[in-house]
Structures are given as structure tokens and as C-alpha cells.
Image (cartoon, rainbow, N blue to C red):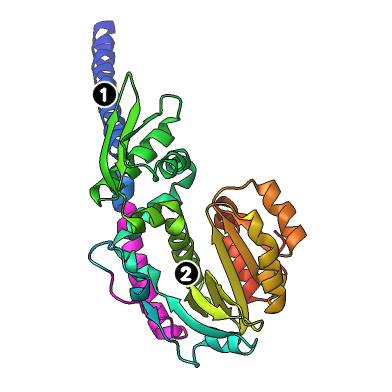
């Protein structure tokens, strides 16, 4: 009897060991493939959501600003060749600006220029907390044509993984002319950025504007909010001075104004307050979105300058409440 029980236990033990080995193998596969799997799932879900939202937008929302086909390559245009479009006076955003004695001179359709790189700026925005250290180092090297090295030995695994993934994406599309990652013992990222002025513009901040624009529009569509939008309109203020705005929205016959900064911003705060007052934009409908600033500073400056100042994480966290505030005319507390 005892021999039989021992035999059964030994068999069960072997079975459990095989199960444990299988689980270890599965865990290893998931760990090694996690980044690629996450990317595939994200792109698949995003593509399906985009198709659905575009369908809903075309059938249920007010006419949107026309988006031109993307460029095949990221080429530098001459200033007088910059893509601009004249707007109809029937455009809801144009009408609301005209009511404030503001004329729209033109707007630049920069989303179309960078459409081929939408996966890159979405990745940068989604992973910003993990790639910010690499991005700061990268931006500091853009004035030099030499190859640079970054030691990442003291970075977290998430920062190293996300930064290497971003560098690979930038290298594949030509934004980096050279890239290689040396593992242990040096743990160095070696790279050289392209000198193309438009690429430099993208890496120093244009990516952030593009990400915020698509993030806001995506959330507005998901929430089924009826809206119209203009990006980068050049306007003539009642004072006779020109000013380029980042994002202007019309929601429920209200004007919502958003400025986006990935670098120095404090010198603009008084100017934004003055323009907001001049255009009679309600303080709760004025926004300044920053890539890098503490939440405490954002809250303090918001009260001081009558504008909602949010860093990227605050925007992601509060996006639903922001939409409800604008849609239902409730005062938003930052």
C-alpha cells in the first residue's frame, strides 16, 4: 500500500514539475515578447478605434478641418511653401472668433506633414515618463553632428527598455542616422541625430503638440462630444497684432483655447492671460499643457494666471472631467 502511494506521489511530483517548467517557459516568452506584443495590440486596437471614431465623426459631428494626405517623406519646405488653407466663414471656430472681432489669416495643417510618424509621437506620449530622460539627452545633442554616448547603467529597466525602443523607431525612420545599444558591462546608448531642420523641430517639441492634439480629439470622439477644431491658426487680434494659437475648439458654442509647451513657458504666462482676457475666453476654458512641471507648480500657477495649467500626467488623469466640464458648463477645479 505504501509503495503504491509513494509511486502516485512521485508521479504527481513529476507532473507538477512539468507544469512549473511550462509556466517558467511561458513567463520567459511573455517577458521577452512583451514589448512587441504590447506594440501590436496597441496598433491593432488604435486602428479599429480610429476607423470607428472616424465613421462616427463623419456621420454625427460638425464638419472638421480637412486633413490632407500625408507626405511620403519628412521633407523640409521653404517658408512660403508651408501648407496653409483658407477657411470658410461657416466654420464654427472661425465664426466664434469673428464674433470676438478676430480674423483667421491662415492655419497650418502640420498633422498631415507628420502623419507617417504618428506611431512614434503616440509612443512618446504614452511612454513619456519612461523616455523623458533619454529625450532630454537627445535634445541636448541636436546642435552637434557628432556621435553621442549615454550611459544608462543607473536607469530603471523600464526606462532602458522604453528608451531603446524609441531609439530603434527613430533610427528605422531616419530621424537617427546611427544607433546602437551596448549591453553589460558598459550599458551605453550610442546615436547620432539627423541634421534635417524638420526632424530637429519634431524632436524638440513638435511631437508633443501632435500627441496632445490627437489625444484630445480621440477622447472627445470617444465621449461623443460634438466639437469643431482648428490647429495652429494664425489670427489677427483686435489690437492689430498677429498671434499663432496651438488649438482652438468650439464646443456648445463656447471657445476652448489650448497652448502646448514642451520647453520654457513662464515668459508666456502673462501674454496668455492678456490674450485670454482680450478674447473673453472664460478662465476655465483656457489651458496650458506642459510636458515637464510638477503638479504643485501647475496648481499654484493656475490660480495666479487664471488659466488651467496641467502637466501631461494631469491631463491624462483629468481628461474625462475636463470634457464634462466643457460640455456641461461646469466649473473645473484644477
Identify the mark at residue 21; answer none if there is no mark. Answer: 1
Q: Secondary structure at mark 1?
A: helix
Q: Quadrant of residue 166?
A: top left
Q: Are marks 2 and 1 in contact (CB under 8 Å)?
A: no
Quadrant the C terminus occupies:
bottom right
Residue 121 sits inside the magenta stretch = no
Quadrant the N terminus occupies:
top left
Q: Earlier in the sequence, mark 2 or mark 1?
A: 1
Please provide percent x and percent y for residue 246. 52, 69
Q: Which residues are magenta?
A: 41-70
- Name the residue tied to disc 2: 217
User: Which residue is rendered at x = 62% and y = 65% of the image?
Assistant: 287
Please provide percent x and percent y for residue 168. 28, 43
Looking at the image, residue 242 sits to the left or right of residue 27; the answer is right
Looking at the image, residue 174 sits to the left or right of residue 303; the answer is left
Looking at the image, residue 122 sits to the left or right of residue 306; the answer is left
Please provide percent x and percent y for residue 61. 46, 83
Of the pair 127 and 198, the residue shown nearer to us: 198
Residue 46 can be seen, yes or no: yes
User: Which residue is rendered at x = 25% and y = 52% of the image?
Assistant: 173
Number of labels in the image equals 2
Asked if residue 313 is positioned above or below residue 68 in the image, the reply reads above
Identify the mark at residue 324; answer none if there is no mark. Answer: none
Dot 1 alpha-carbon crowd within 10 angstroms: few under 14, some 14 to 19, many 20 or more? few
- The majority secondary structure of the magenta stretch comes to helix
Dot 2 alpha-carbon crowd within 10 angstroms: few under 14, some 14 to 19, many 20 or more? some
Residue 122 can be seen, yes or no: no
Q: Secondary structure at mark 2?
A: helix
User: Which residue is rendered at x = 47% and y = 61% of the image?
Assistant: 209
Amino acid at each position: 500500500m505504501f509503495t503504491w502511494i509513494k509511486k502516485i506521489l512521485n508521479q504527481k511530483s513529476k507532473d507538477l514539475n512539468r507544469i512549473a517548467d511550462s509556466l517558467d517557459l511561458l513567463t520567459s516568452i511573455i517577458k521577452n515578447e512583451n514589448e512587441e506584443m504590447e506594440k501590436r495590440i496597441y496598433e491593432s486596437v488604435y486602428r479599429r478605434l480610429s476607423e470607428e471614431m472616424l465613421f462616427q465623426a463623419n456621420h454625427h459631428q460638425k464638419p472638421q478641418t480637412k486633413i490632407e494626405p500625408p507626405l511620403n517623406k519628412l521633407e523640409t519646405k521653404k517658408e512660403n511653401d508651408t501648407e496653409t488653407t483658407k477657411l470658410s466663414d461657416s466654420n464654427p471656430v472661425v465664426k466664434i472668433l469673428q464674433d470676438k472681432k478676430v480674423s483667421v489669416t491662415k492655419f497650418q495643417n502640420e498633422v498631415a506633414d507628420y502623419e507617417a510618424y504618428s506611431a512614434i509621437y503616440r509612443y512618446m506620449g504614452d511612454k513619456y515618463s519612461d523616455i523623458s530622460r533619454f529625450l532630454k539627452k537627445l535634445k541636448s545633442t541636436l546642435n552637434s553632428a557628432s556621435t553621442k554616448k549615454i550611459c544608462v547603467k543607473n536607469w530603471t529597466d523600464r526606462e532602458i527598455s522604453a528608451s531603446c525602443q524609441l531609439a530603434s523607431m527613430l533610427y528605422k525612420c531616419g530621424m537617427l542616422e546611427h544607433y546602437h545599444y551596448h549591453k553589460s558591462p558598459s550599458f551605453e546608448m550610442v546615436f547620432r541625430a539627423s541634421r534635417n531642420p524638420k526632424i530637429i523641430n519634431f524632436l524638440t517639441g513638435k511631437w508633443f503638440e501632435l500627441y496632445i492634439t490627437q489625444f484630445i480629439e480621440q477622447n472627445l470622439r470617444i465621449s461623443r462630444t460634438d466639437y469643431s477644431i482648428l490647429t495652429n491658426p494664425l489670427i489677427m487680434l483686435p489690437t492689430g497684432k498677429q498671434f499663432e494659437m496651438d488649438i482652438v475648439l468650439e464646443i456648445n458654442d463656447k471657445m476652448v483655447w489650448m497652448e502646448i509647451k514642451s520647453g520654457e513657458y513662464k515668459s508666456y504666462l502673462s501674454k496668455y492671460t492678456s490674450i485670454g482676457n482680450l478674447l473673453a475666453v472664460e478662465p476655465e476654458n483656457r489651458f496650458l499643457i506642459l510636458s515637464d512641471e510638477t503638479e504643485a507648480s501647475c496648481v499654484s500657477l493656475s490660480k495666479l494666471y487664471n488659466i488651467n495649467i496641467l502637466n501631461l500626467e494631469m491631463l491624462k488623469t483629468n481628461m474625462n472631467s475636463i470634457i464634462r466640464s466643457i460640455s456641461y458648463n461646469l466649473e473645473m477645479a484644477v
